[in-house]
Image: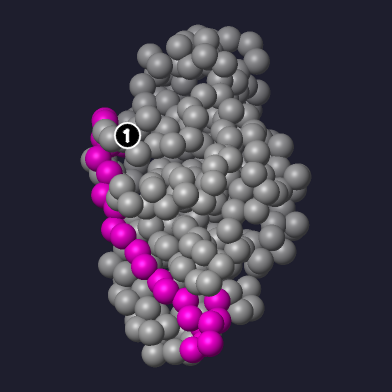
Amino acid sequence: MSGVLRVTKEHPVRLEWKRLARRFRTPVRSAAGEFSRRESLVLRVTSAGGAGYAEVAPWPGFPGPSLDETERELVRLSESMRAGTVEVDAAFPAALPPVRAALEWARLGWGSAGISRPCAALLRDDAEAASLVAAGYATLKRKIGLRPVRDEQREVSGLVRACGEGVKLRLDANGALCARDCALWCDFLSEFPEIEWLEQPMRVGAEAEMLAAGEKAGVAERVALDESVCAVGSMPGEWPGVIAAKPLLVGDLDAWRARRMAYPQVAYASVFESPFGRQAALCVAGEDGRAGFALGFGTLGAFDDDLDAHAAGPAASTLVREPEFWDALWNRL
């Protein structure tokens, strides 16, 4: 992503950021732990052309720099900007890909508006499934890897029956499974075509074992990678199953666009961003005409505040608003 941002004395640019902490209405539980709040950094880049916004939102359990590490680099870059001349390519180490992506969006803007795609809902409790299906959701995502495999498989079997025909289910282990349990879940998938995929069954680095389990059960194309592909530099050269890409984590967006062409199946998902990050992430997903899966953006309403600006429901859509809207939202943070 050559020349994401160049600053000179003749063309000054101001970089600002705010640290945002939002409390979940109900703690989010996964194999990676239980989380009661979400922290991120919202960026504003101001130049003669106006202000652009973006977000850096690392998620616990995913490889990459922490929020504190990111903020220290932002301080360093901001100081370089005030000194008069800086090129982000030279100023930023490769270890901070989410910041590079955020600066690209802040500089270039969000492109075409009016993007709308089917959206998958995140199940916080199996009891929610009936109401979500009634509301129009055709794809639901459920966390696994929290309790014994056989217990969870009985629950998932019941969930599939309860959802009825035409509803797809995604299972996300967040890397919690051992090789034996991964094999059991792959065998389980072979019995249930309603399950769209098994996401990140094992830890980062165990991709060969995950693929072997999927191939043995005949479901390799339904084994998805998530944590293993959170940044372009960590992505495998090829993968027969699904690549679950989180736009705010992939880093260099030009490199992602080039790498994406190697993957036959790509799905896009949220990391509980604020409206700034959600808008950017939806634009990344919207420009990919080959991605036919429902977007994993069913995260609205998760926070105990009124900051969400996008419409909730079985379609995930960008906001079509004037720049003043984003300025006002920034002032609320």
Q: Is residue 152 or residue 109 the one in the foreground?
A: 109
Q: Is residue 220 magenta?
A: no
Packing grade of label 1 (10 A; few <14, some 14-19, many >=20) is few
Describe residue 37's horizontal placement relative to residue 257 as left or right: left
The amino acid beneath tag 1 is: Asp
Up/down of 251 relative to 214, above or below:
below
How many numbered marks are there? 1
Residue at point 64%, 78% (across, down): 2
Q: Is residue 10 magenta?
A: yes
Residue 317 in the image: x percent, y percent?
A: 58, 35
Describe residue 202's horizontal placement relative to residue 105 as left or right: left
Residue 277 in the image: x percent, y percent?
A: 47, 50
Residue at point 29%, 58% (across, down): 19
Residue 18 in the image: x percent, y percent?
A: 31, 60
Q: Is residue 188 or residue 243 the one in the foreground?
A: 243
Q: Is residue 327 visible?
A: yes
Dominant secondary structure (helix, strand or loop) of the stretch shown in magenta = strand
Q: Is residue 174 visible?
A: no
Up/down of 21 relative to 14, above or below:
above
Describe residue 151's horizontal placement relative to residue 160 as left or right: left
Up/down of 2 relative to 46, above or below:
below
> Which residues, given as a range, are shown in magenta?
5-29
Which SS class for mark 1?
A: loop
Q: Is residue 108 or residue 11 the one in the foreground?
A: 11
Residue at the disc numbered 1? 306
Residue at point 44%, 89% (across, down): 84
